[in-house]
Image (cartoon, grey):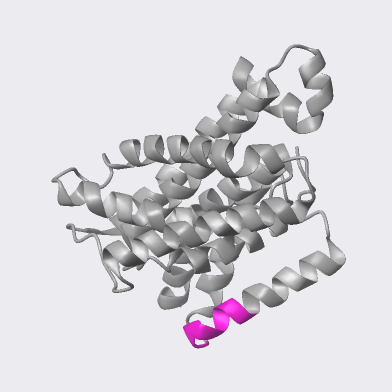
Amino acid sequence: MIEIVSSILDGLLIGLVYGLASIGLTLIFGVMDVVNLAHGAVISLGMFSLYFFFGTGLHPYLALIPVAIIGFLLGVLIYQIAVRRILDGPPLMTLLATFAVSMIIVGIGTALWSTSPYNVNFKVQTLNIFGYTVTSARLIAALAAVLVTFMLYYFLYRTTLGKAVRAVSNNREAAELMGIPSQQILAISFGIGTALAMLSGALIATLFPFTILSGSIYELKSFVASVLGGLGNPTGALFGGVILGLIEGSVAPFIAISWTNVIEFVIFVLILLFFPTGLLGGRK
């Protein structure tokens, strides 16, 4: 029983990090109806960005700040170069554009770091919570994910710029008529979504070894979590990530870890069939 509860607790903590990753994906979709296929590559880039800053002597958790800044600037750049001119075209165009960006990032990353595994090797303590053991790295990663989610919620609902993002998401034409510069807002939104993806990759890098290809599996998990919570709904995405983590934690003591992905994607298909807008509904 102790092993099962500990596994579920670990799943809950990593699920919050999955939720942070999926928020970046669903925010971009919710604001501009773009399915960002560069999401996984950006997550991998966040992992290696943390690895780089850690190599310079910066503590991994302090390195999250420059990683987020780099992610935001990269997102704005991707939007301006690859997405802006084709945003109002057929959906396949943005899919192909973001897929091309993904291939560029993976190609450059493979040339620089190959596909060998890397890890951020720093001292990790174990904590005893009501008799159950968890690593401090997982607990800090989960708390960081919750904090960033709260900051995003505050930004979207309590600041003028955040309200402009929501207005553009609801009706871009009407927002422009009210004087909101939609192109700048879209660029900022893409930047925030990319920053969240890189942050989640950096947090994952404090927990597991990684390669330049590791982001692909977390991209798939982000899609599952986003659909669970409702595409375009950032709060729902966090909720979907928690569900995903709890599923992984619940089944891990009983079956081989390789089967967890199968279970997750079966649930993914069932949600699409019976709850096409997600468990919490679509965009908010």
Q: Where is residue 173 in the image (x, y as percent from the top left)?
A: 82, 24
Q: Quadrant of residue 224?
A: bottom right
In the picture, measured across the screen, residue 74 lies left or right of residue 52, that is right
Q: Nearer the viewer, residue 58 or 150?
A: 58
On the image, the x and y values in percent for residue 280 come to: 76, 49
Q: Where is residue 267 in the image (x, y as percent from the top left)?
A: 71, 72
Q: In this view, does 134 lie above or below 247?
A: above
Q: Which residues fall within the magenta stretch? A: 255-262
Residue at the far top: name it.
179
- Name the image quarter holding residue 74: top left
The residue drawn where x is 72% and y is 41% is: 87
Indicate whether residue 104 is drawn in magenta: no
Q: Tell me: residue 34, above or below residue 205.
A: above
Residue 215 is at least partly visible in this image: yes
Q: Which residue is drawn at 69% across and 47% down?
A: 34
| Magenta-drawn stretch contains 260 | yes
* Dominant secondary structure of the residues highlighted in magenta in the image: helix
Viewer-proximal residue among 273 and 198: 198
